[in-house]
Amino acid sequence: MTVSTLVSLAPKHDGGLMLKNPVMTASGTFGYGTEYAKLVALERLGAIVCKGTTLRPREGNPQPRIAETASGMLNTIGLQNIGVTALVREKAPIWAKWDVPVIVNIAGETVDEYGKIAETLEGVPGVAGLEVNISCPNVAAGRIPFGVDCDAAAAVVTAVRDSSSLPIIVKLTPNVTHIVEIAEAVVAAGADAVSLINTLLGMAIDVRAKRPYLSTLTGGLSGPAIKPIALRMVYEVAKAIDAPVIGIGGICTAEDAIEFLMAGATAVQVGTASFVNPNAAIEIIGGIDSFLREQGMKDIGEIIGVAQMGRRT
Amino acid sequence: MTVSTLVSLAPKHDGGLMLKNPVMTASGTFGYGTEYAKLVALERLGAIVCKGTTLRPREGNPQPRIAETASGMLNTIGLQNIGVTALVREKAPIWAKWDVPVIVNIAGETVDEYGKIAETLEGVPGVAGLEVNISCPNVAAGRIPFGVDCDAAAAVVTAVRDSSSLPIIVKLTPNVTHIVEIAEAVVAAGADAVSLINTLLGMAIDVRAKRPYLSTLTGGLSGPAIKPIALRMVYEVAKAIDAPVIGIGGICTAEDAIEFLMAGATAVQVGTASFVNPNAAIEIIGGIDSFLREQGMKDIGEIIGVAQMGRRT
Amino acid sequence: MIQGTVGVVARAEVLPNVFLMHLRTPEIAKRAHPGQFIHLACDDASDPLLRRPLSVHRIGRAGVAGAKAGIYSPSDRRESSSVDLWRPAEGEVSVLFARIGKGTTALARSNPGDALSAIGPLGNGFSFDPKARNLLLVAGGLGIAPLVALADEAVEREMVVTLLAGARTESGILPAAALPPEIEYVVCTEDGSHGRQGVVTGAVAEFVDWADQIFVCGPRPMVEALIALRISPTKSAQVALEEHMACGIGACLGCIVQTRRGPQRVCRDGPVFRLGDLR
Amino acid sequence: MIQGTVGVVARAEVLPNVFLMHLRTPEIAKRAHPGQFIHLACDDASDPLLRRPLSVHRIGRAGVAGAKAGIYSPSDRRESSSVDLWRPAEGEVSVLFARIGKGTTALARSNPGDALSAIGPLGNGFSFDPKARNLLLVAGGLGIAPLVALADEAVEREMVVTLLAGARTESGILPAAALPPEIEYVVCTEDGSHGRQGVVTGAVAEFVDWADQIFVCGPRPMVEALIALRISPTKSAQVALEEHMACGIGACLGCIVQTRRGPQRVCRDGPVFRLGDLR
Ligand SMILES: Cc1cc2nc3c(=O)[nH]c(=O)nc-3n(C[C@H](O)[C@H](O)[C@H](O)COP(=O)(O)OP(=O)(O)OC[C@H]3O[C@@H](n4cnc5c(N)ncnc54)[C@H](O)[C@@H]3O)c2cc1C
Ligand SMILES: Cc1cc2nc3c(=O)[nH]c(=O)nc-3n(C[C@H](O)[C@H](O)[C@H](O)COP(=O)(O)OP(=O)(O)OC[C@H]3O[C@@H](n4cnc5c(N)ncnc54)[C@H](O)[C@@H]3O)c2cc1C
Ligand SMILES: Cc1cc2nc3c(=O)[nH]c(=O)nc-3n(C[C@H](O)[C@H](O)[C@H](O)COP(=O)(O)O)c2cc1C
Ligand SMILES: Cc1cc2nc3c(=O)[nH]c(=O)nc-3n(C[C@H](O)[C@H](O)[C@H](O)COP(=O)(O)O)c2cc1C
Ligand code: FES
Ligand code: FES
């Protein structure tokens, strides 16, 4: 019996951004893919999302950049990356030869920057889609993240939409009261899909030094600790919007991934878990397949959103 | 050498709600205190906050009510409690004999209910203060929690303030974009102190049953998993407001508590950790004392807010 | 009820994925009654976070049939081979548990000599009807765990005990050596691989008239089948329930079960309830 | 670089709170170079979450002085007593680590026979200057861990090695038996309880002219003191750095260190850097 795990991340887009399975690696946690080439059978992945890419190269933040917390970690990498020009020159040609779609995660400090990055990536072989990270601080609005405001978020999406013919995924921040409103706003502005969640804003304090542990005081919390929050948000957003949702947050095992799919996610991204187990995504793909077989199911679609149906009694 | 750990939770209030040490037990995690009387030397606690109390008794939610998550737990107890009348009759007289202040956590579904509960508790011996839980759904506003809206939150505080001469702590929900704004609003409305955080909204899915695990679909996430988020919010709020902040969220050890104090909390509450170790709060009190001695400090005030000072270099 | 450290004296996998552990804890052994439980921490790190409740399986106490003679010093480490596998020594209690998730997996890794953090004994325990002489014990799967302590005490009191034990297959059935020899042991397996074929509740009818009192522990569907039998209230049928627990002490209200007496906490008002009170 | 399971063959507390562990991992043993590290998972649960990087302390490989003869089957469990404590057998590598936090505490609890998840060997490793003959190795505290593998290989290549090892007190100093016998071992303790009194960097001046090449591993202040000595670049001084790591593979950018060549990843571009490149 063959089981189909094909999913489309952009059903309204030409080409549709079809993935052979719904398991992707999350931005910032799998580098440019190349770092893992020796350990992981990359061609088996649904897709790879590369490190957040900015218009110009960035050196990122001072040390310390990471702190471990209970079942999680805080990071403040500060979007260190080679910049979109180097990416087009050095990374995209490698990806073009791979048998796995690579999605470029992009980040700007102004609406204009987002548009320019998207423009630079237009028509570049090896780039299958864009994931627009709107958790970055909007320098124009006093460093408030774009993603906490419906209008700012929509403006970013419009700018990217206007500069790109690629499928556009918009990555939402969880640090908001009503994530559904933001999701609705970005879909209305032309997002093909949304991905959530990015990291939760957190802090650790070094009690010996009597100061915040990370160089930038706060950092982004990721890992299994945040899974329940992510799952709740995915459930809420999937219920509200008519576009694919990509679930992210603390996914380590096939069971975790299936929870997100059942909550309504069309696909998932594996983040921090890849640090712990570079083959986490590959093992999850195998585990989902086994689960579907065990349940006598023929298509991944049979589990997507099933937990939306009803209340437990 | 003696070390002073005395703190005031309501410096602008007559009496001040002085605690012999800054370690309290959190609402809903220590029952009415009586449940732990055999295992824990209650009189050594800074204060006890009792289970959330409503105007009328409540039976709470169906099973399952709790789910374990990575370094955390979800709960949907649903404010099961004996109601304020039974509390005044059965519990307060016991507390009046204890050598530890007991603060009553109160919860209403309308602004009016908050006022009525506060009225009922006015002048009752054994009740040292009120903690106003504004995470409850505001039935008048379509079940949106009071605590996510500055005006609704302020209205609750005003109602309680008008009905009570007790010190008032307002307990904030973390499920908001800008927690500082809510904190400022409740302090402006007359809160003597704020406590944070309540639980984060989360979900778990039972992949075998293909539905959300908890009877109410979502539940509140607590435990070590949420500590980094809580600490960040305490840091932000303590920097912004001119009233004591009580830090809550994942505190298990003295080091955890000291992180919150250094972030600017005047006191802390121990929640989920008491389930794991009923003597967690007692051990934390001892650990803070040892830390102060080790550092050659004479007063707990020497660590409160020290991490607010500066950036790491 | 105490909170403290207990020492793992022995651990053995007595059935596939089922572990028996002897814990040295004179204070709990002194106080424990059949039907009560111990709340055990599985790990010092925070995942798994919560304690796990396990029934007192047998109690090592003078005057309890399950206890072997002999006094051990607190530092005592015995190798599994030198332990009387089935009977905890004086000052010890044993627990019998299935390895199902991360908590019990961590517990199953404990070695003799390890220390675990425990709270106990917790809950109310079973109570004997002073007039009862013939006792029927009905166990589904690992529900047998608390009933063995009960059987020990009943034997001590010279009562007549029949234990009906059911499991899916023979691999879920304890050997007779695991039980006090004085009792009658009736085994049912769903696939007929050991004892009678069928579910354990099917065999209950045969013994119910004979029994003066009935004690039950097992999965929820089994308990419901027994409720459906409408056993006469004069038999004082008691059932030990399970619910997911956080505190184990009555504070969190996580373990509520609805009864005819209103919502009750399994950890503190139970885990033993009158069968007739359940809905 | 492989990801796989390694077997704990032996574990011993060789100094107070310092553990030596032999790991059976033919694939890593075959590939590892001195200065590289292994990224070890400490627990299957998610707290602690991240792997912990530990240097390859000695390598059991034919042609490496640290290796003892003998081939072991994968199922091999040796008791600590029957192991050559200091030398891993062929197909094994050893790690030497301080128990400081929850990760190393969990690791220190591993028993012979346990399996651990490992990724390795990772990082670049030390490199010999082809013209070098006299090597000066400078270790602060547990910084000695990777330098022993280096000493083994240098001895194999018939180089002349002096190892300066510093610690707070004698309880932090490895016995000479822990090192290849061919090397000169100079001990410094801050309290003078063993060897010379003072910090190890104080003794460096005496050997620096003699040395053709210098290898350093130790706490950051020690490294900074060495940078301040402005050792001639002709000595090709190399230093193994530490930074907090998540991936260990070059993907997360958590372990960046600023160098004269720009930001570098300790895990992939290092952990060994030219002393002269550090700022
Ligand atoms: C009073 C009482 C006595 C018990 N006695 C025994 C016994 O003697 N032998 C035995 O094998 N089992 C017993 N159980 C069940 C045992 O507690 C669970 O099997 C165990 O907690 C599962 O933990 P886990 O981490 O391995 O599984 P997981 O699936 O990881 O557990 C996840 C969560 O569910 C809870 N949980 C899962 N199953 C149960 C359950 N059936 N009851 C309560 N909580 C559960 C755990 O506490 C945890 O919070 C008893 C339960 C109760 C309430
Ligand atoms: C390349 C490399 C090689 C190392 N080799 C050795 C060795 O051979 N022997 C040895 O004893 N130690 C070595 N260390 C340090 C060792 O990794 C840490 O002592 C260990 O990770 C501490 O973990 P913990 O959980 O016990 O402490 P915790 O304090 O709980 O660690 C908390 C967090 O900090 C990180 N961390 C803490 N200290 C360090 C550190 N010094 N370097 C990197 N991360 C750290 C941990 O990974 C974790 O994320 C090496 C470090 C690196 C980077
Ligand atoms: C070290 C690190 C770097 C990250 N960098 C980015 C990034 O550049 N762009 C982005 O959108 N998300 C970034 N993220 C967020 C992850 O892609 C993911 O949304 C988040 O970590 C939650 O998933 P997880 O719990 O599976 O890690 C980063 C996360 C980590 C841990
Ligand atoms: C089982 C449970 C019940 C709770 N009930 C209440 C409540 O009635 N009122 C309230 O304000 N907070 C309640 N809380 C929230 C806690 O007081 C605390 O704010 C939260 O758990 C975070 O702290 P922790 O991580 O230390 O548990 C409850 C928490 C738990 C786990
Ligand atoms: S487990 Fe907390 S009340 Fe029963
Ligand atoms: S640890 Fe991830 S890049 Fe070095």
Image (spheres, coloured by chain):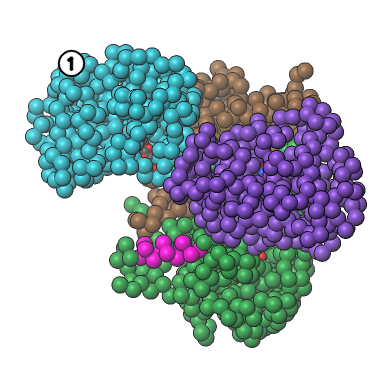
Chain colours: A green, B brown, C cyan, D purple
- At which x and y percent is residue C187? 16, 37
Q: Residue at x 45, y 65 (%)?
A: A285
* D203 w.r.t. C117: above or below: below
- At which x and y percent is residue D173? 72, 34
Residue A285 colored in magenta in the image: yes
Q: Which chain is mark 1 on? A: C
* D81 w.r.t. B187: above or below: above
Q: Is residue A301 left or right of residue A244?
A: left
Res D86 seen here: yes
Q: Is residue A133 left or right of residue C116?
A: right
Q: Is mark 1 within 8 Å of ligand 1?
A: no
What residue did someone put label 1 on? C158
Residue C215 colored in magenta in the image: no
* B130 w.r.t. D74: above or below: above
Q: Residue C27 or D72: which is nearer the viewer?
A: D72
Q: Residue B263 or C37: which is nearer the viewer?
A: C37
- At which x and y percent is residue A230? 53, 58
Q: Residue D146 or B261: which is nearer the viewer?
A: D146
- At which x and y percent is residue C49? 50, 40
Would you identify the image quadrant in which residue C71 lies?
A: top left
Q: Is residue B192 left or right of residue A46?
A: right
Quadrant location, the N terminus of chain A = bottom left
Q: Is residue C275 left or right of residue C244?
A: left
Q: Residue at x 91, y 52 (%)?
A: D230
**Magenta region:** A281-292
Q: Residue B292 or B89: which is nearer the viewer?
A: B292
Callout 1, which amino acid? Answer: Glu
Res C227 seen here: no
Looking at the magenta stretch, what is its main secondary structure?
A: helix
